[in-house]
Amino acid sequence: MRTKKLLTIIVLVLIISLAYGSYNISLTDFRLSDQNSSYLGGLTWSRNLTASLDLAKQENKPVAIYFWAIWCQYCAKFQSDTLGNPQVKKVLENDYVLIAMDLDIDRDAANTYRVTAPPAVVFLGPDGTELDRISGAVDADYFLPIATQVRDQVRSK
């Protein structure tokens, strides 16, 4: 009986070793945030609200503040399906100053913008005034026209 258990353990260790060795994946490849930025939906989002609002003013760009949480299942879907959509990604990368606020960490910002549940995106003009908002894990077909409208509204001023 002991031999059978020992063989089972050896086989399991070998399988795990081979499986781990065949994948060259590191946990650092899956970082969501560091001190300065969050990496969500294939986009780089600033974590510095003040500096980002100053940048938006300088560049006359709208701001998208994405409120999320690590435990939020809807955020994961929103990030992959909506923010990861090539058209949405292009508009956000090229035409917006992006800020991400973790609801568990950035509670003051969430209170300031009256966000109580993730996911939520608050769109601001370069002067910091709220222009629109989206609450919930909406799809790209819903998100893109709003993001485009806010961008065009800022450009027309």
Image (tube, rainbow, N blue to C red):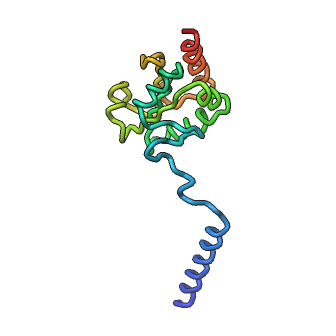
Q: Is residue 54 above or below residue 11?
A: above
Q: Which is more toward the observer, 93 or 106?
A: 93
- Residue ID at (57%, 38%): 43
Q: Is residue 28 above or below residue 4?
A: above
Q: Residue furthest top?
A: 157
Q: Estimate the x, y position of residue 19 in percent, counting from the top left.
A: 64, 68
Q: Is residue 150 above or below residue 36?
A: above
- Residue ID at (65%, 72%): 18
- Residue ID at (55%, 52%): 30
Q: Is residue 6 above or below residue 53?
A: below
Indicate left or right for 128 with 21 as reference. Answer: left
Q: Estimate the x, y position of residue 131 in percent, counting from the top left.
A: 47, 16
Q: Estimate the x, y position of residue 59 in percent, counting from the top left.
A: 53, 22
Q: Quarter holding the C terminus?
A: top right
Q: Residue furthest front?
A: 58
Q: Which is more toward the observer, 117 or 21?
A: 21
Indicate left or right for 108 with 127 as reference. Answer: left
Q: Which is more toward the observer, 104 or 53?
A: 53
The answer to which quarter of the image holds residue 155 is: top right
The answer to which quarter of the image holds residue 26 is: bottom right
User: How many discs mark residues in the rendered view?
Assistant: 0
- Residue ID at (58%, 82%): 10
The answer to which quarter of the image holds residue 47 is: top left
